[in-house]
Amino acid sequence: MNQEGIFMTIPTPASPADWTDGLGLARVLHGGGPVVALRRDGVAKARLALVDGQVFDDLPALLEAAEGDPAAIEGGAVIDAPDHRLLSPVGRPGKVICIGQNYLAHVHEGGRATGPAHPDLFPKWHTSLAAPYADVALPPESDQIDYESELAVVIGARARRIAAEDAESVIFGYTAANDVSVRDFQFHTTQRVAGKAWDGLTPVGPVVVPATRLGGARPDLTIKGTLDGEVLQDDRTSSLLFGVPELLAYITTVMTLEPGDLILTGTPSGVGFVREPKVLLRDGSEFEVRIEGIGALRNRFVAEKAV
C-alpha cells in the first residue's frame, strides 16, 4: 500500500455506481485491512469502490482521485460487508470540525435566548472517531456522558475562502455522527474540547451518501436520536441556524478544507444532560442516530475498565 492509500489495480470489470436508494460509501474490513466500498444501509454485501480501477483504504484518497465527483466512482467486485465489519467511513480525516449551538431549540434548552452571532467551532481528531455498530467504551473518569445526534458533512474538494453560494461544489456528501459528550469535562473551562475529543467516543457512519442525492448544500432531512428504543431527539436538518453553505464559508475563511474532512453540524434539542432527571449513557445503553436517506448509526455503550 502506498502513501496515497491505494491497495491495487483491480482487473475485474467495473460499472458506474448507481447512486439510488441510499447507496453510499463505507469502509469495510476485508482481506486483513480496510477498503472503501459501495454499500446500502442494512445490506450485508458491498462492491469495491473504484476510481480508474484502483481500490482505496480510506475516503480522503478516493475523493481526491475522483476529484469529489460521484460519477467518477465505479463498483467493482462484490465483497461481504456485514455490520460488524464496518469502520468509520472516514478513517483519518485531516480535520474534524464540530459546531455547537446550531439548532434554536437546543439553544433554548441550554438556557439561552438566542443563538451565537457566528458559528461556534471546536475540533476533534481522527482518534476521536468510532465505527458504526461497534461497542463504544464509556471512560471510567466520568458518569456524565451524553449523546448528540448530528448530520456530518464530508468535504470532496479543497476549499479556501469559498462563498456560501459556491459551497455545493466542494461537498461530496453526508453521513451521521454521534457527538458523544463528557459533560463534566466539557464544563471544566470555557473551552469545550476536554469534553468532546475523547478517544473512540464519536461514532460516524454507516455510509456517506452523495449530497446530490440528499438535497445538495441545504438538505432537509429528518434526524432522530433514539436511546434504548425511545426517541429523544427529533428534528429536521433544515432547522440549522447556520446552514451548511454558511458553515463552509465561515470555516474556509479561517482554514483550508481538504477532501475527506468532516464537519459535524450540531445537535437538535433533546440531549440528556438538560433533562430532569438527566438521561445519560450507561453500561449497556444502545443509541441510534437515524437520518433520512443515510440510514442508522447504531452503537452499544459499554463500561471501559479502568487500567
Image (cartoon, rainbow, N blue to C red):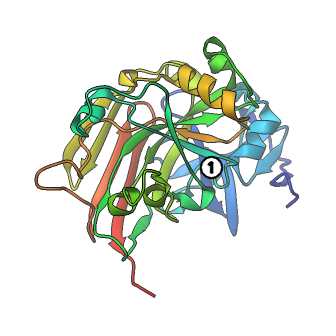
Decide: is 116 above or below 95.
above
Residue 17 visible at all: no
Rendered location of residue 108, percent (x, y): 24, 32
Q: Secondary structure at mark 1?
A: loop
* The N terminus, quarter of image: bottom right
Please state the total of marks drawn on the protein image.
1
Give the camera-side residue of 183 and 303. 183
Dot 1: within a 10 Å radius of its alpha carbon, few (fewer than 14), some, or many (20 or more) residues? many
User: In which quarter of the view is residue 16 placed?
Assistant: top right
Q: Which residue is mark 1?
A: 90
Residue at far left of view: 276
Residue at far bottom of view: 307
Describe residue 215's horizontal placement relative to residue 70 as left or right: left
Residue 248 visible at all: yes
Decide: is 8 above or below 102.
below
Q: Image point 63% across, 27% down: which residue?
A: 171
Q: Amino acid at mark 1?
A: Val
Give the camera-side residue of 27 and 256. 256
Describe residue 198's horizontal placement relative to residue 255 as left or right: left
Decide: is 107 above or below 219.
below
Rendered location of residue 219, percent (x, y): 46, 21
Q: Image point 76% across, 29% down: which residue?
A: 72
User: In which quarter of the view is residue 232 placed?
Assistant: top left
Decide: is 89 above or below 65.
below
Rendered location of residue 248, percent (x, y): 60, 26
User: In which quarter of the view is residue 294 placed?
Assistant: top left
